[in-house]
Amino acid sequence: MRYSRRDFGTLALAGLPAAAMWKAFPTLTLEARDKINSKDINSKIKGVTIGAITYSFRTIQDPKEIIKAYQTIGLGEMELMANHAEALAGIPSAGGGGGGRRGGTPPTPEQLAAREAAQKATAEWRKSATEATFKPVRKMIEDAGIDLRLLCYNMSDLRTLPDGRVTGTTDEQIEYGFMMAKWLGVEALSTSTQVSMAKRTAPFADKHKMMLGFHGHANTKDTNEVASPETFEAVMAASKYHAANLDIGHYTEAGYDPVAFIQKHHARITNLHLKDKKKAERGGTNGPWGTGDTPIKDVLKLVQKEKYKFPCNIEFEYEGDPVTEVTKCLALCREMLA
């Protein structure tokens, strides 16, 4: 009977004693034995790194349970959402106060005061954050056998609301995102933002010498949205540290070929997001893999053939239990790369 590296890893995680494993598999190389002795989860399939963004598990409230989900599924690479990173680092809740639901009664003065106090505590926590704040987060993830490669830190351009308040990401907050990434020891940042933000993020990316991957969506009608080949090229032109976090599902929905994009821009890709979306003319819906138009297999085979090093991260967005569905997606990756 032939056993894959995944089989070996599963046995190791299950706690099978090493001596029993060597007896069961006497032909294992020393390198393979070292991998089994380690706690690292191996989800590298035929040379292609398959992981997931923690956004896929957004219905799981406790981020520590999200880490456990990676272990259960067998995912060895993580793209960590900033809110999950902060929660793991102990940020105070900003949801105090309650009240003021849309269509309901306005919040009471007491509720407003509680909300403002919670927001102030959150802001102060961020200002006081250091490497010591986030270093335990990386250790927690590494101790679970997971490679933390990316931090997803979403940003938005500044705009003034009708009531005079200014919303969006300040320069101070941009700096905080890059510092959080450095404190976590990740290789790169990913972000969902607008084309206009590229001019503002460029000096920070240059300063920190850290790659920033712009995540694309499918809104090609708004030229300030990262969606088309031209808008991706525009944000990458702003800094040599700007890159693409190509979501192959959204890119397909928008009517473009992700294979062609990867072939042209592979040196400027931080990571891929894997999902199966239909093209816009067929509804642009997101569903279980195999129901859409996204050439997932072609993309994975290209990454495998050309030996690209960037991770391919599953982003689960359709209905269903995330652990169950992401497990299916990982299994399909194995089939496609077989």
Image (cartoon, rainbow, N blue to C red):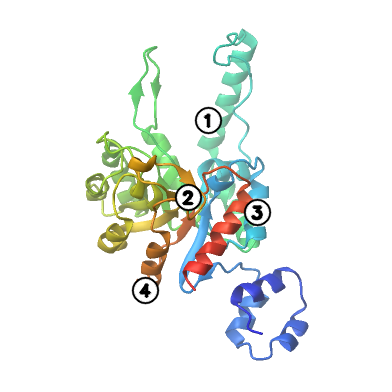
Q: As shown in the figure, which amino acid type bears the numbered disc 1?
A: Ala
Foreground label between 2 and 1: 2
Is residue 103 visible to us here?
Answer: yes
Q: As shown in the figure, which amino acid type bears the numbered disc 3?
A: Ala
Q: Earlier in the sequence, mark 3 or mark 1?
A: 3
**Tag 4 near tag 1, CB within 8 Å:** no
Residue at which label 4 appears? 305
Category of crowding for the residue at label 3, using alpha-carbon neighbours closer than 10 angstroms: few (below 14), some (14–19), many (at least 20): many
Category of crowding for the residue at label 4, using alpha-carbon neighbours closer than 10 angstroms: few (below 14), some (14–19), many (at least 20): few
Q: As shown in the figure, which amino acid type bears the numbered disc 4?
A: Lys
Separation (CA) of disc 3 from disc 1: 30 Å
Residue at which label 3 appears? 69
As helix, strand or loop, the secondary structure at mark 3 comes to: helix
Residue at which label 1 appears? 123
Separation (CA) of disc 2 from disc 3: 18 Å
As helix, strand or loop, the secondary structure at mark 2 comes to: strand
Give the side of residue 2 with respect to residue 307, left or right. right
